[in-house]
Image: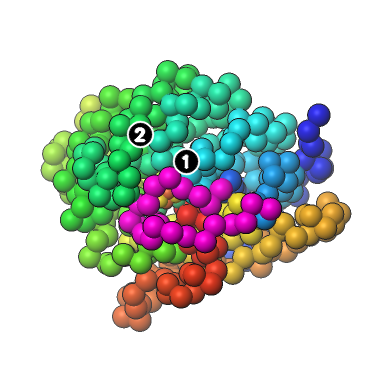
Amino acid sequence: MTNIPATQSASSQDVVDTFGRPLRSLRLSVTDRCNLRCAYCMPEEEYVWLPREDVLTFEEMAQLAGYFTDLGVDKVRLTGGEPLLRRDLPRLIRLLLQNHNIKEIALTTNGILLSDHAEALYQAGLNRVTVSLDTLRPERFRQLTRRDEFARVLEGIESVGRAGFTGLKLDTVAIRGFNDDELIGLIEFGKHYQAEVRFIEYMDVGGANEWVPEKVLSRELILAAVGNYYGSIQPLPERGSAPAQRFQLPDGATFGIIPSTTTPFCSTCDRSRVTADGMWYRCLYATAGTDLRKPLREGVSAAEMLALIRGGWQSRRDRGAEERKALERAGLREGGLIGIDRLREDPHLEMHARGG
Ligand code: SAM
Ligand code: SF4
Ligand code: SF4
């Protein structure tokens, strides 16, 4: 029998941060490694990987998730790096599902290994799959990701429905001058697989040092292009803290926009992230996190772990994207978020380490 999260049965003690935002959604990065080199995320060929012994075991992840659920978390998203590079992910899902406070487990993947694992993931109880897909052109895919894996991603997308999943999402980083001519093609592709496409505005996070404001395809431009093609598009009601704004096309199909750069949604942000080696970040843009692995491995009590996480959330003031937007308005924003020297010193600051 594997470890059941230690605090599973404790009563819920929901906690809010300094702006009254609850702690609801946890992104668990299961590995920092990746089999692609997307230009906006891991532009270098070589990275300093986390030492194997530093990476949390599945039992440690489940135990940590148990503390978070005691404080209000009910949704867990598995991410990376590329999460399917971590062997036997279904075992982690089964472990997490022993915690009945978890209402939903989702996975964000680049899709390359998905067709090998979709069925086992479904059988293990995974609820939702999001596949990242930025282009439908194999050559563009290779240019963006430096790998010739487009065909396997398509196989992965096809395998999702076959395995039994519904509600597939396709996340597309919308990049001006790169894939702005594929918005309609991607929506149509999504319809074919009963998948909702969500266009994410390009963010200058971590090692995305190829970011320049001119490459951001804004929500307004996306809406204009899609509206121009389909005619009227209707906004759908917002869903609480969900980052995507959703829209309906005349034929009933839907798509989403995650306007992280031009219209930040920090005021309702209930998300935080744990890296594969147990660093906890309260914001995608945070430059400092809390080491949860050390106290976990030192065997501190559940009460102390809960106090650490509760205190960390209660003191949370992060509004990373809004602050960057304010700096930009004041003309004070220069270049990328974090310099390359700083990134080399602390790889946790990379997008791929903290899980997007
Ligand atoms: N490797 C998996 C994947 O690509 O789906 C999971 C991790 S990846 C870091 C999570 C998400 O972050 C992906 O959808 C990716 O497109 C997005 N992402 C990475 N860098 C980004 C950036 N600079 N701007 C916007 N989205 C980004
Ligand atoms: Fe691309 Fe995801 Fe890998 Fe980043 S972690 S390089 S977004 S596949
Ligand atoms: Fe949340 Fe930080 Fe993103 Fe704002 S920038 S939505 S606070 S993760």
Three-letter code for the amino acid on which mark 1 is drawn: Thr
Residue 276 numbered tag: none
Q: Count residues near mark 1 (Cα–Cα under 10 Å), then give few for <14, some for 14-19, many for 20+.
A: many
Whether the residue under disc 1 has CB within 8 Å of ligand 1: yes
Mark identifier at residue 108 = 1
Q: Quadrant of residue 331?
A: bottom left
Give the mark nearer the N terminus: 2 vs 1: 1
Image position of 352 with respect to 6: above or below: below
Quick check: is 111 in the magenta stretch?
Answer: no
Kind of element beneath mark 2: helix
Q: Is residue 311 visible?
A: yes
Picture quadrant of residue 294:
bottom right
| Looking at the image, residue 327 lies above or below residue 33 | below
Q: Is residue 167 toward the left or the right of residue 56 in the image?
A: left
Residue at 83%, 51% (x, y): give it: 302
Residue at point 30%, 36% (across, down): 150
Q: Position of residue 84 (x, y in %)?
A: 51, 38
Give the quarter of the figure containing the N terminus.
top right
Q: Which residues are magenta?
A: 31-53
SS for dot 1:
strand
Q: Tell me if I can see residue 236 in this picture.
A: no
Task: Name the side, left or right, on which 287 lies relative to 258.
Answer: right
Q: Which residue is mark 2?
A: 153
The percent coordinates of residue 273 (x first, y second) are: 58, 54
User: Residue 177, position in %: x, y?
Assistant: 18, 56
Please tell me which residue is depicted at 35% across the width and 34% down the height of the picture.
153
